[in-house]
Image (tube, rainbow, N blue to C red):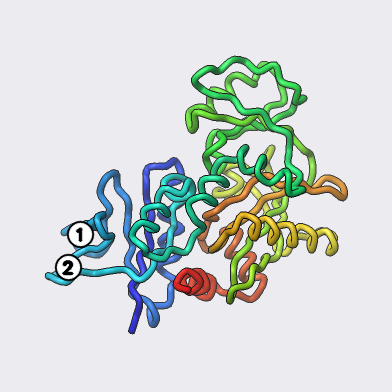
Amino acid sequence: MKKNIAVITGGEASERGISLKSADVVCKHLNKDKYNVFKIVIEGNDWVVERNNPVKLFIDKNDFTFTIEGHKINFDAVFIAIHGTPAEDGKLQGYFELLKIPYNACGVLQAALTFDKLRCKEYLAPLGIKTANAELLYKANFQIPNSEIALPVFVKPNKNGSSYGASKVSKQEDLVSAIEEAFKYDDEILVEEFIEGTEVTCGVITIDGKVTALPLTEIRSKGEFFDYKAKYEGNSQEVTPAEINVALTKKIQATSEFIYSKLNFKGMCRIDYIIKGSEYYMLEVNSIPGLSEESIVPQQARAMGISLERLFEISIEESLK
C-alpha cells in the first residue's frame, strides 16, 4: 500500500522562492509507485494543498490532515522543503513532534542550533572544530563596532540563509551600510573574519543507518564570495568532486561525519568550509540544503551514483524508521 507523503514548503522567509523550487523538484522525483505525494504550501496562516483545481483545500493544523470528497487524508511522513524559518529554526519540527508524524529533517534542537551561526560555532569549538573569529551585534543596542577583527570582514545575518543581507567589507567607510543591510534580515548580525582560501562544501546523509559524507564540492565564485548570485544565478563554478588533495578531502569528510554525529543529526545536511593551506575552517551547517536539480547536495549524490529519486527515497525511508 502506498504511503501518503506531504512535501511542505512556502513560508514567509526571504528564501520562500527557493523553497518552492526545491519542493517542485522533490514532488517530481519522489517515487510515485511507492508514495502518494501531496505538496503543501504555507501561505500566511493557511496551509494549502496544491492541486490542479481552483477550489482550495486547507490543512487542518489540529492534526495535519485534509478532507477531500468526504475522505480524511492522513500523512505517513513529511518531507520538509523549507529554507529559513519556520523549518531551519526548528519550529515546524516541534509541531510534527507533538503530532508524532515522522519527518525527514533534523530535530528541533539541531535546527535551532545550526540556524544560529554563532551559537553553533560556540557549541562545536570545544570539540576541536576550527571556525573564523566573529563578533555578534544586536539591532536593539547597535553601535559602530570597535572591532579587533581586521578588515576585510564578512557582515551577515546571524540567522538567515542563501546569503541574503551578506556582504564582504574591505573599507571602514562601507561597514555601517553593510551592517544596516544585514539588519534588514535579522536582529542579530555577525562581523566575521575573512579567511582567504578555497571554499568547499560537504553533504552528509544517513544511508541504511550509517552516517555518510558525500563527495566534496569546490566553490569557485566569480564574485567576491559565494553570494546569492553565485548560488542561484550561475555566478560561480561548482566542481564536484572537488579538485583538492585526496588526504585533505578525506579529513574534511571525516570532520563532516563527526559534526553530524555529535549534533545527533538526521536526514541530510550540508557543511561549508574554507581551506587555507593545510588547515580548514567550518563556516556553517545548513540543516535543509537546496534540492533543485543543480543544487550542491544533488550534485554530490549523483557523483556518488545516487539519483535524485534514490536520494529523496533514502531521506523518506530513514524518517519512517
Mark 1, secondary structure of its residue: strand
Residue 129 versus residue 243 in the image, above or below: above
Mark 2, secondary structure of its residue: strand
| Frontmost residue, 53 versus 272 | 272
Report the amino acid beneath label 1.
Leu
Q: Quadrant of residue 223?
A: top right
Left or right, 251 with respect to 65, comes to right
| Frontmost residue, 3 versus 241 | 3
Confirm whether residue 17 shows in the render.
no
Query: As drawn, which residue projects farthest toward the right?
Result: 278
Q: Quadrant of residue 260?
A: bottom right
Q: Whole-percent x and y of residue 237?
A: 68, 53
- Checking the image for residue 57, the label placed there is 1
Q: Do the residues under discs 2 and 1 have CB atoms within 8 angstroms?
A: yes
Q: Whole-percent x and y of residue 304?
A: 66, 73
Bin the neighbour count of mark 2 within 10 Å (Cα to Cα): few under 14, some 14-19, many 20 and up.
few
Residue lying at 22% horizontally and 57% vertically, measured from the top left: 60
Report the amino acid beneath label 2.
Ile
Confirm whether residue 156 shows in the render.
yes
| Frontmost residue, 210 versus 52 | 210
Q: CA distance from mark 2 to mark 1?
A: 8 Å
The N terminus lies in quadrant? bottom left
Q: Whole-percent x and y of residue 42?
A: 32, 51
Counting residues from the N terminus, which is met first, the one under dot 2 or under dot 1? 1
Residue 4 versus residue 266 in the image, above or below: below
Left or right, 187 with respect to 6, comes to right
Residue lying at 61% horizontally and 59% vertically, measured from the top left: 296
Left or right, 160 with respect to 126, comes to left
- Checking the image for residue 68, the label placed there is 2
Query: As drawn, which residue projects farthest toward the bottom?
Result: 1
